[in-house]
Image (spheres, rainbow, N blue to C red):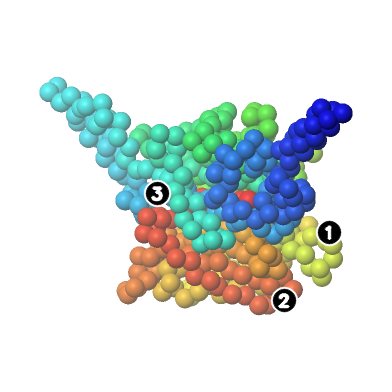
Amino acid sequence: MGGIGRNSIDYDDEEEGREQEQQLIPGLPDEIGMECLVRVPYGSHSRMKSVCRGWRTLFSHPSFYEQRRKAHTAEHLVCLVQPLQFHAHLDVDVVLKERDDKKQQQQQQEDCRYHHPSESESLLPLYQYGLSIFNATHQTWHQVMMPGGDSIPMMFSHCVALPSSGKLLLLGGWDPTTLHPVPHVYVLDFIAGESRRRWRRAAPMSVARSFFACAVVGRSTLYVAGGHDSQKNALRSAEVYDAETDQWKTLPAMSEERDESQGLSWEGDSRFWVVSGYSTENQGRFRSDAECYDPETGCWSKVEGLWPFPSSSPRGGCVTGQSNRNHHRHHHHHRWWQFAGEEQGGIGEIREYEREADRLRVVSSIPLPDPEFGLGGSSKCVINLDGDGDGKKKSRRRMLMVMGSGGEGEGEGKGKVGAFILERNRNDEGKTKWNHVHVPPQFNGFPYSAAHLLL
């Protein structure tokens, strides 16, 4: 009997050990374990994955980050494509002139029979771009490099977030050596994989383009339209990407050429919007209309009067979102925020619109902070940070603004990059607050494109 009892005890201990191994935290119910783990800062997740197989699986699955959002412990990550610090302020026209000068110099060198440029000399990029991550929850900055410590292999690439899967896409732009448009697509996974193995090369676009419109519709569908080719001819072409199957499909062309247009989408609306832009023959004169693609009909339709600023690009200067008017559950209204007022002088403002059918109605105007803090230049970028993150902030809508051309005039603000977070109370949208964000010198480059992830 004694042997049977001992074997029974050993069996019970073994069962208990297996049960504890299956628990998120041994000795605690899984509900309590999850409450603990969702509070671990995002910056520590890579180390948590190395603790055990169960945690590696947990911290590598999108459902865990959905739990963080429900618990209001998710963190706001702002992804910025910007020139590296030694080329902090780039002007496209200057870059193009330097490209033409370089071509002329290379032609002269080819004519000289005694000149033999080295391989490293001929492959040296003129400019380099990096991907910067600003953690708006903890007010920290860091830079993400490609495998091998390289910079982003494209200039002026678009970064687009897929929030449901925790991925960031980098699309198109210019080759930094030839300054010609490229069709390249790269994917950075913020959830799965180890830090050195989370980049991958995705299927390229069918058309090499830059300065195009793009937006995510739904969970994994990305639309691209317009922009220009290597001869700076404005494009009408469009295509759509399925991030789950890694496949592109060509769409019908828009009715108008649209270079430097802005792509938009709204939650709950399956359509893709391309706002403003200009044609090859009217460079720099931005259209007031937009085109909207409906996947149900497979057709584009034109919407008049969405962009009233003929000399200003909509790129980076407008963003969409939702509001919960009257606090009715599931009663969402489409909102659009855009910079305005600077063409008439003054410091400018953010205008908030509500979309009613295919028309926009102004619902509020929010003055920008004083230009001396670095928001006095003409180039600005706005990112919608609305979402249930830090529990202390869950009653507020937040937007991050970043500007890279520096303040006007003389003094301390001249040449600075200004960054502010706008906080608005959902219960009283008349109450607003601007919080200044410190930008370290190595992140002073104006962001060509930006995206937001809540993880």
Measured as percent of width and height from the top left, residue 211 is found at 50, 44
Label 2 close to label 3 by CB (< 8 Å): no
Question: As rendered, which of 286 and 447 lies closer to the eye?
Answer: 447
72 relative to 316 in the view: left or right: right
Real-space CA distance between mark 2 and mark 3, rounded to the nearest whole angstrom: 38 Å
Measured as percent of width and height from the top left, residue 404 is found at 42, 59
Measured as percent of width and height from the top left, residue 41 is found at 58, 54
| Residue at x 79% of width, y 60% of height | 332
- Look at mark 2 in the image and give the residue it sits on: 428
The quarter of the rendered structure image containing the N terminus is top right
Real-space CA distance between mark 3 and mark 1, rounded to the nearest whole angstrom: 41 Å
| Residue at x 43% of width, y 62% of height | 439
Residue 60 vertical placement versus 122 (above, below): below
- Look at mark 1 in the image and give the residue it sits on: 330
Real-space CA distance between mark 2 and mark 1, rounded to the nearest whole angstrom: 19 Å
SS for dot 1? loop
| Mark sitting earlier along the chain (2/1) | 1
Q: Label 2: few (<14), some or many (≥20) within 10 Å? A: few
Label 2 close to label 1 by CB (< 8 Å): no
Q: What residue type is labelled 2?
A: Asp
| Residue at x 39% of width, y 37% of height | 150
Question: As rendered, which of 378 and 7 lies closer to the eye?
Answer: 7
**Which mark identifies residue 83?**
3
State the image quarter where residue 149 is shown.
Answer: top left
Measured as percent of width and height from the top left, residue 425 is found at 68, 72
